């Protein structure tokens, strides 16, 4: 059946598709983050430094992820989005399982390269599909629910990974994390139907309509000042988010002497529940507040980025684990309320035929800066400060990185100034 043969999606079908894409996104973050919970074991077994660990956690994934994002998103904009998602899910799942078979640092790095390439096929086509299944007034909520995958993936990855690590070993944790993705990829390919491009706005794309090239999409988005400032804000948020997700478990094991299971149950559970709650509330509030003024899509991210910062430092600096985790929960809840509004705007600022590429542009930039730079910088800083602070060096590295949230708040507010004009330009271009 052609993607254009499918009529307007029913509400039940829309939620079914969103559920499958959410499951894939959960596995995305399980497979991406499982390395964090076993990093100390790998460091000891392979004799690595924090700088080398930082490369595995960040650049080894981000570089290939960014390079693959644009051609895969272009494919999704002109071809079958479900095929792109299914193939990507198969690749990253297989490479996660292969990580458990690595016999050295080089092999583990190659597996991380493969995970990065596979996961580049996940989010951009998923965002494009969701935007065609849900109208603009419900899109931030739908994308926020899709964003649960980050937090549920972290939760299940840390909880399950920590338990398997303690019961067996770090290699088994990779194998258990990777294998479930392959049957899910088959289910997505066989049961997901694709609506017409622009269906969410009630538009009917013609069969012969062609998608713009990568260069045309990037050039169009670069002219939108709102998009540029929003990408900048998202990058600073990504520096904060990826640093705490990838180095938070290491910090708890190294400084507070927790086991993998303890970290998984405490940090993973708090991150999962707080992240889901914050992302959901942010999406719902954004959908409601934008009816008064569309700029709330950016004012809200600015406010919550500012409000979250005071709760980040007690997590890193508290001598007791209880108060530290409470502070982390509040910080993580507030700090993830920006997710739905930001991704909704990324779709709203792009024409239907360039939405996967718009998502890829934002995602690639966030991954390049947040995951490619953040964990690596923390690794460098840990090694540099270790002579003076010993195992506590990681406290101060992560505390310094948390200040990036303040910069994000300012940039979100700046982005709001031109939002009305840029949205109007996008609507005029559709006419």
Image (cartoon, rainbow, N blue to C red):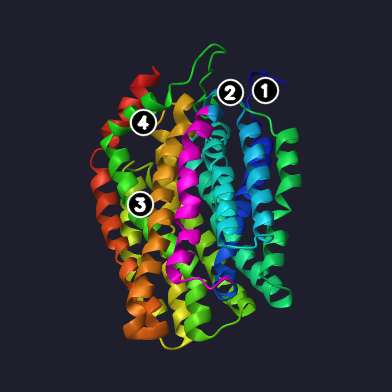
**Disc nearer the start of the sequence (3/1):** 1
Nearest to N terminus: mark 3 or mark 4: 4
Comparing 422 with 406, the one in front is 406
User: Residue 123 magenta-drawn?
Assistant: no
User: What residue is disc 2 on?
Assistant: 196
Which callout, 4 or 1, points at the residue further toward the start of the chain?
Answer: 1
Up/down of 3 relative to 385, above or below: above
Q: Which residue sits at x=45%, y=70%?
A: 50
Whether label 2 touches label 1, CB < 8 Å: yes
> What residue does disc 3 label?
235
Looking at this view, is 108 or 292 the one in front?
Answer: 108
How many numbered marks are there?
4
Q: Quadrant of the C terminus?
A: top left
Residue 20 lies, in percent from the top left, at 67, 44
Residue 384: which quarter of the image?
A: bottom left
Give the image location of residue 233, x and y in percent: 32, 51
Magenta range: 46-74
The residue at the point 38 percent across, 74 percent down is 382
Which residue is tagged 4? 218
């Amino acid at each position: 059946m052609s993607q254009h043969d499918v009529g307007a999606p029913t509400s039940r079908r829309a939620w079914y598709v969103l559920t499958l894409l959410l499951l894939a996104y959960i596995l995305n973050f399980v497979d991406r983050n499982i390395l964090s919970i076993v990093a100390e074991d790998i460091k000891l077994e392979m004799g690595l430094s924090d700088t080398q660990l930082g490369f595995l956690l960040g650049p080894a994934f981000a570089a290939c992820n960014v390079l693959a994002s644009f051609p895969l998103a272009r494919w999704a904009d002109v071809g079958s989005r479900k095929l792109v998602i299914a193939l990507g899910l198969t690749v990253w799942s297989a490479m996660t399982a292969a990580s458990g078979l690595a016999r050295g640092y080089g092999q583990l790095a190659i597996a991380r390269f493969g995970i990065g390439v596979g996961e580049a096929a996940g989010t951009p086509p998923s965002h494009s599909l969701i935007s065609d299944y849900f109208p603009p007034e419900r899109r931030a909520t739908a994308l926020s629910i899709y964003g649960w995958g980050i937090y549920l993936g972290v939760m299940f990855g840390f909880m399950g990974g920590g338990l398997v690590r303690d019961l067996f070993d770090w290699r088994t944790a990779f194998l258990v994390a990777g294998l479930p993705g392959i049957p899910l990829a088959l289910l997505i390919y066989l049961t997901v139907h694709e609506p017409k491009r622009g269906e969410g706005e009630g538009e009917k794309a013609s069969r012969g309509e062609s998608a713009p090239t990568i260069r045309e999409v990037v050039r169009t988005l670069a002219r939108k000042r709102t998009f540029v400032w929003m990408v900048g804000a998202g990058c600073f948020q990504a520096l904060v988010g990826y640093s705490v997700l990838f180095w938070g478990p290491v910090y708890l094991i190294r400084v507070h002497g927790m086991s993998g299971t303890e970290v998984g149950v405490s940090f993973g559970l708090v991150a999962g529940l707080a992240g889901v709650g914050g992302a959901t509330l942010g999406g719902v509030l954004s959908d409601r507040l934008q009816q008064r003024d569309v700029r709330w899509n950016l004012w809200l991210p600015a406010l919550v980025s500012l409000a979250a910062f005071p709760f980040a430092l007690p997590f890193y600096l508290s001598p007791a684990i209880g108060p530290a985790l409470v502070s982390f929960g509040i910080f993580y809840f507030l700090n993830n309320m920006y997710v739905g509004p930001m991704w909704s705007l990324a779709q709203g600022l792009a024409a239907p035929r360039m939405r996967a590429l718009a998502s890829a542009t934002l995602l690639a930039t966030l991954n390049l800066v947040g995951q490619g730079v953040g964990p690596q910088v923390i690794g460098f800083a840990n090694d540099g400060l270790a002579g003076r602070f010993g195992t506590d060096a990681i406290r101060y590295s992560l505390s310094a990185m948390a200040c990036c949230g303040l910069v994000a708040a300012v940039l979100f507010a700046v982005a709001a100034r031109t939002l009305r004009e840029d949205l109007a330009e996008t609507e005029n271009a559709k006419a």
